[in-house]
Amino acid sequence: MTLINNIGGAKAPPFNDRLLLAGIFMVCLWVWGYNAHYGHAYMMVVIAIAVLALMAGDVFVSLFGIYGACWFAYQLSAFSVGAMDAIDIIQAMDTMMLIMGGLIIYTAVRHGNTSKTTWMNGICILASILTVISLIQYFHGQPARATLGNQNFLGAFLAISTICFFRAKWWALIPLIFVGLYATHCATAFVALAVGLGWLAWGWKGVALSVIPGALYIALFKGFGSLINRAEYWTDAIYKTSNHWTTFIFGTGPGVVWQPGNMLHSEYAYLLWNFGAIGLILAFCYIFRSCRQEADRRLFASFLVILVDGISNHLMHTAPTAYLAVAVLALKDRPLEA
């Protein structure tokens, strides 16, 4: 099956739906035995994920989606023969639904007809609402997290959104957003925003210079203790996945937790843990290609914010920040004239 090739604004040809024809065979024949109906239902979702991946319009997004679908198919078969615990398959199915949702959002936004300006206006409005809610919480002695449940997630949301305010009529709200970001006390979000603003002002030189204010903010207001603790999590995940070549190359599988009740606090560590070296390579190929590809300057700056925040925050593991991040990626990947 050939990938849909509509990069650059060319009209997509009719979709080759042979995978869907093969899919009905896989739904009926992949999972047998005890609780087969459960396996059949989720195998249909696996096929849907693979098809959505092919429709995404980006080679690396497509490859990652297909790779994830292969993992889910393996997990279903492993569970059906008793080689996978029930708790792990439940977590895998939750992850399956989130990945499918992400692919739908990415594909719909990338190929949608709502303008980038309208999208950025909506992001600014929502960020302003969340900021007001968080400041009300802050001045009443509560953590500034608005409706997002955690200060780090709100910090990431505001940092990604702030770039959209650097436009006519919206710039007047920048001080409000900065106050809201400060109220979260989220160092990762501040450093990520510094990188994005550095790019917006001076390109890659600005990115290099952004290290200075980022390091000063951490040293003066946060300290490096939290970062050191998270680095210990990451090294532990690397050590565990490196124990065997299969886990190093393929990972432990989507949805498999690193430690019950704890998080790795890094999207890159999670890529290695769940998807192995293959997942990391696909992500870095997408990043490298994005850095060489022309894109809207503001959206690329927001993209850099996402990349930096993901170093020590799991922003793709909570719906609001994941939704925003996927939408930004899709808008960035649109042709410049769109």
Image (spheres, helix red, strand yellow):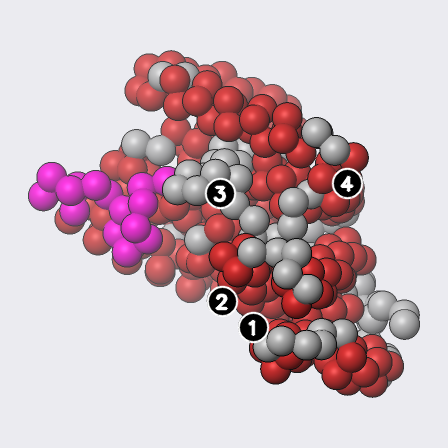
Among numbered discs 2 and 3, the one appearing first in the sequence: 2
Residue 124 shows up from this direction: yes
Tell me the residue that label 2 is attached to: 118
Look at mark 4 in the image and give the residue it sits on: 246
User: Is residue 181 toward the left or the right of residue 37 in the image?
Assistant: left
Label 2: element kind: helix
Residue 271 place in picture, x, y as percent? 63, 43
The amino acid beneath tag 1 is Thr
| Mark sitting earlier along the chain (4/3) | 4
Which sits earlier in the primary sequence, circle 2 or circle 4? 2
Q: Is residue 130 left or right of residue 244?
A: left
Identified by mark 2, the residue type is Thr
Q: Viewer-proximal residue, 143 or 261? A: 261
Mark before the other along the chain sequence, 3 or 1: 1
Q: Across the whole image, how many numbered discs are drawn on residues?
A: 4
Q: Nearer the viewer, residue 29 or 279?
A: 29
- Residue behind mark 3: 314
> Which of the two labelled residues, at mark 4 and mark 1, occupies the earlier sequence position?
1
**Distance CA(mark 4)–CA(mark 1):** 43 Å
- Report the Cα–Cα distance between label 3 and label 1: 28 Å
Dot 2 crowding, Cα within 10 Å, few <14, some 14–19, many 20+: few
Question: Distance between the Cα atoms at labels 2 and 4?
Answer: 45 Å
Mark 3 packing: few (<14 Cα in 10 Å), some, or many (20+)? many
Q: Given contact means CB atoms under 8 Å apart, are the residues at marks 1 and 2 in contact?
A: yes
Which residue range is magenta in the image?
137-152
Labels 2, 3: front one: 3
Above/below status of 258 relative to 149: above
| Callout 3: SS | loop
Magenta stretch encompasses residue 13: no
Gap in angstroms between the C-alphas marked 4 and 3: 24 Å
